[in-house]
Amino acid sequence: MASLVIAEHDNKSLKDPTAKTVTAATQVSTPVHVLVAGSDCSAVAEAAAKLAGVERVLIVDDPVYAHAVAEPMEALILSLVGSYDAVLAPATTSGKNFLPRVAAKLDVPQVSEIIKVVSPDTFERPIYAGNAIATVQVPEGKKIITVRTTAFKAVEPTGSAQIQKVSAPADPGISRFVGEELSKSERPELTSAKIIISGGRGMQSGENFHLLEKIADKLHAAVGASRAAVDAGFVPNDYQVGQTGKVVAPDLYIAVGISGAIQHLAGMKDSKVIAAINKDEEAPIFQIADYGVVADLFKAIPEMEAELTKLGY
Amino acid sequence: MKVIVPVKRVIDFNVKVRVKADGTGVDLANVKMSMNPFDEIAIEEAIRLKEKGNASEIVAVSIGPQQAGETIRTALAMGADRGILVKADTDVEPLAVAKILKAICETEQADLVILGKQAIDDDSNQTGQMLAALLGWPQGTFAHKVDIKDGKVDVEREIDGGLQTVEIKLPAVVTTDLRLNEPRYASLPNIMKAKKKPIDQKTPGDYAVDATPRLKVLKVTEPPKRQAGVKLKTATELVDKLKEIGAI
């Protein structure tokens, strides 16, 4: 049979998690098709067609899909699912939103946030905030899977798949997109940044995050935060790294004023190199950090900035 | 408007979980158990809707072992009106939970279900969405703000890029995110009063649901451990080190 990957995009560009989900899909069932559902999204479909390993891109161009509202997405995927034995979506807030609806309607369990394909019907997934890894086998029937994209490499943009238009089923008409407030930033996105600098409760205020932003700008890094910093209102929710926020695995993660609650570690402990600055020597973050500095961040961060400037960053 | 709030009994969020040596799961013996934190937020939101006059009755439902009754008591002490305990001694997967909840929503003629976006034990993040699909209802997941008016709910949702608002028609399912509210503590008089509130005892069979797990858990293992690294004296030294290893 084949697998269907639901593309993550903003109607203009294809997002990085899609190429990583394709990698997982090639290990589950081939050929791989990608569904691009959106509005004025032909550029997205063209980008998806270039992903290596993708045989066909299905495009549905209709305003109802512009914001991936769950109910019409469910109807659309169900209308296509007959030809596939697996449907995969990245475990983003979008994929997590609509895909369980599809599984329920097909009367099959969903496997959430897989980190490894052991065999086409067996997967590893983290449970208990990543403190345990479960290996699960799915029963006969269609496989419905969300993919933790930090665990898979992106396929290269070297392919040339055909693009096929498909028609949209009727909108169930029980839900409607009203609006959104997206954080605007010139910096890289948290989930695709190579370097992330995150602040915690120790930052003391939202204004103080400017200190981190200065470092971020020098290193082309994204700025993140712990749940404590988001709950305290220092920064918006989309900064949150952790079990219930974003899961990241950059080449370098710099934790500043973050104690290292289990919940936060769950979202960043797969980073290649972890550096931590905290004035509390006993902070749990130091137990997983490759490099730790016990210091007051309000002294350490300006020092860091000065040294980076000196080195020409 | 009748509101159903499913609550799950899970390992307390402060407990460091230990994987069993035989690889069959996580050690739950003599471990502190609590209500899933996202479900506490769900109960709180339901109570606020009742205080505002939007909701008339709050029914707390838990599916699990007999001790899940304690989790329902906590919900009743916070302000839910009555409880339903669906007794199941093995793990019940999200799909089966959704099927049981669907049957309860139908018998109770519920207008709204509010539940946590995920349980902090299996981290599936599925039940609310599955329930909504089975009922043919719309959903507002990862809710940051909930506003009910004229048979509709505006749900402001926490999404990867920021916040998104959807308008969904009632009846509907809402799943809670962290910033929706701050749950109250139950007062002593309310804890006493909760002891008199009724809890119905049911089984999955009463709802004609087969709760046998469909996913086969082959093993549960410890994740690879990270070793603590080296302590450096200053941030200047840190920058030099990161440069030296090519991390920046």
Image (tube, rainbow, N blue to C red):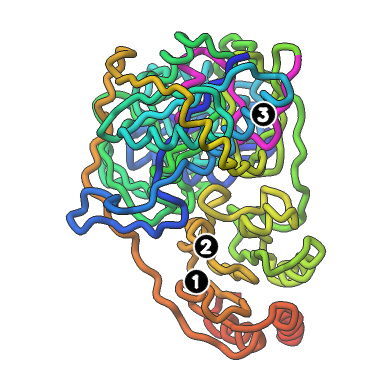
The residue that label 3 is drawn on is: A67
Q: Is residue B138 left or right of residue A114?
A: right
The residue that label 2 is drawn on is: A261
Q: CA distance from mark 3 to mark 2?
A: 33 Å
- Do residues under tags 2 and 1 come within 8 Å of each other at their CB atoms? yes
Q: Is residue B9 left or right of residue A173?
A: left
Verify whether residue A263 appears in magenta. Answer: no
Tag 2: residue type? Ala
Q: Position of residue A227 (x, y in %)?
A: 62, 55
Tag 3: residue type? His
Disc 1 is placed on an element classified as: helix
Which residues, given as a range, are shown in magenta? B126-149
Mark 2 neighbour class, 10 Å CA radius: few under 14, some 14 to 19, many 20 or more: some
Q: Is residue A261 left or right of residue A87?
A: right
Which chain does the numbered disc 1 sit on? Answer: A
Tag 1: residue type? Pro
Residue B136 is tagged as: none
Verify whether residue B142 appears in magenta. Answer: yes
Same subunit, tags 3 and 1: yes
Disc 2 is placed on an element classified as: loop
Residue A284 is tagged as: 1
> Sequence-wise, which precedes: disc 3 or disc 1?
3
Residue visible at 50% across and 46% down in the picture: A158
Q: Is residue A22 visible?
A: no
Which chain does the numbered disc 2 sit on? Answer: A
Which of A20 and B110 lies nearest the eye of the viewer? B110
Using the image, determine if residue A72 lies above or below residue B226.
above
